[in-house]
Image: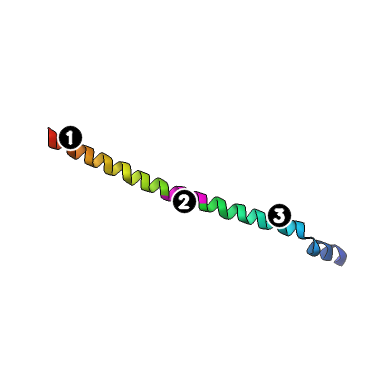
Amino acid sequence: MGGIVRKVLKDQSAATAVEYGLMVGVFALSIVFGMRALTNELFDLWHNVEDHSDAAIKAHN
């Protein structure tokens, strides 16, 4: 049993796979939160355009 534990602890390929998995997770979270911020900015932009368009139409009529 002890030999198996030592063998697993010496094996670096599993540690590398875990590190890559963690990096992919961090990248995925940063993409999700970045897209969320971009979506909020675009939402605000289009509402601003809508408000100004409505005001221009009301001023013209």
Q: Amino acid at mark 3?
A: Ala
Disc assigned to residue 34: 2
Q: How is the image coloured?
A: rainbow
Q: CA distance from mark 3 to mark 2?
A: 25 Å
Residue 56 point in image, percent of width and height: 18, 38
Circles 1 and 3, Cβ within 8 Å, touching? The answer is no
Label 1 neighbourhood size at 10 Å, few (<14), some (14-19), many (20+)? Answer: few
Residue on which the image places disc 3: 17
- Asked whether 28 falls inside the magenta stretch, the response is no
- Figure check: 46 above or below 17: above
Q: CA distance from mark 1 to mark 2?
A: 35 Å
- N-terminal label among 3 and 2: 3
SS class, disc 2? helix
Horizontal side, residue 55 vs residue 28: left or right = left
Q: Amino acid at mark 1?
A: Ile
Image quarter where the N terminus lies is bottom right
* Identity of the residue drawn at 32% across and 44% down: 45
Corner quadrant of residue 39: top left
SS class, disc 3? helix
* Identity of the residue drawn at 46% across and 51% down: 34
Residue 51 point in image, percent of width and height: 24, 41
Residue on which the image places disc 1: 57
